[in-house]
Amino acid sequence: MPGDVRHHILVYLGVTAALLAVSLDLSQIAAVGIVFYLIMDIVIHWGVLRRLRSEVDPKPGIIIAAIAADAVVLLAFTVLRGMESPWMIAGAYGAAAAVFAYEAWYLRRHPERDSNGSGEHESSSAESDAD
């Protein structure tokens, strides 16, 4: 399929949304979304704490509290929803793991490219524009 990664992601997202709409009901789609969101939120907080601490000067206590709160909610949701439909929760965790594995693989294969595809970080280009 021609096009860059951004166009491919839109196609994959559309296909995934169609498959979810056909195979799951609305509450199950929402449950998958909750799992994805909470995992993403934990990972973003962890990334701010580990990688962006010097750039954004976060308060570590607040970030750790947010990670703990997300983890508690994710655990409670997993247990409660997992009793009703464990296959769906396992599928959500499996899909999240597959997304992270694919991202890690892609970033290892393309270390020179970042999210804007230019090969330089957005912050460094913004700094050079300001000069």
Image (spheres, rainbow, N blue to C red):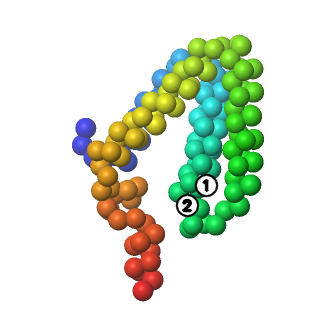
Identify the residue under disc 2.
Answer: 52
Label 1 packing within 10 angstroms: few (<14), some (14-19), many (20+): some
- Residue 52, position in %: x, y? 55, 60
Q: Does dot 2 land on a helix, a strand or a loop?
A: loop
Rendered residue at 45%/30% (across/down): 98
Q: Does dot 1 land on a helix, a strand or a loop?
A: helix
Spatial distance from mark 2 to mark 1, Cα to Cα? 6 Å
Dots 2, 1 in contact, CB < 8 A: yes
> Is residue 65 found left or right of 114 in the rendered image?
right
- Residue 118, position in %: x, y? 32, 62
> Is residue 23 found left or right of 27 in the rendered image?
left
- Residue 90, position in %: x, y? 57, 19
Task: Name the quarter where the C terminus is drawn.
Answer: bottom left
Rendered residue at 74%/55% (across/down): 61
Identify the residue under disc 1.
Answer: 49
- Residue 19, position in %: x, y? 48, 23
Q: In the image, is residue 29 above or below residue 48?
A: above
The answer to which image quadrant residue 87 occupies is top right
Task: Name the quarter where the N terminus is drawn.
Answer: top left
For the residue pair 95 and 29, the one nearer the viewer reads as: 95
Rendered residue at 70%/36% (across/down): 71
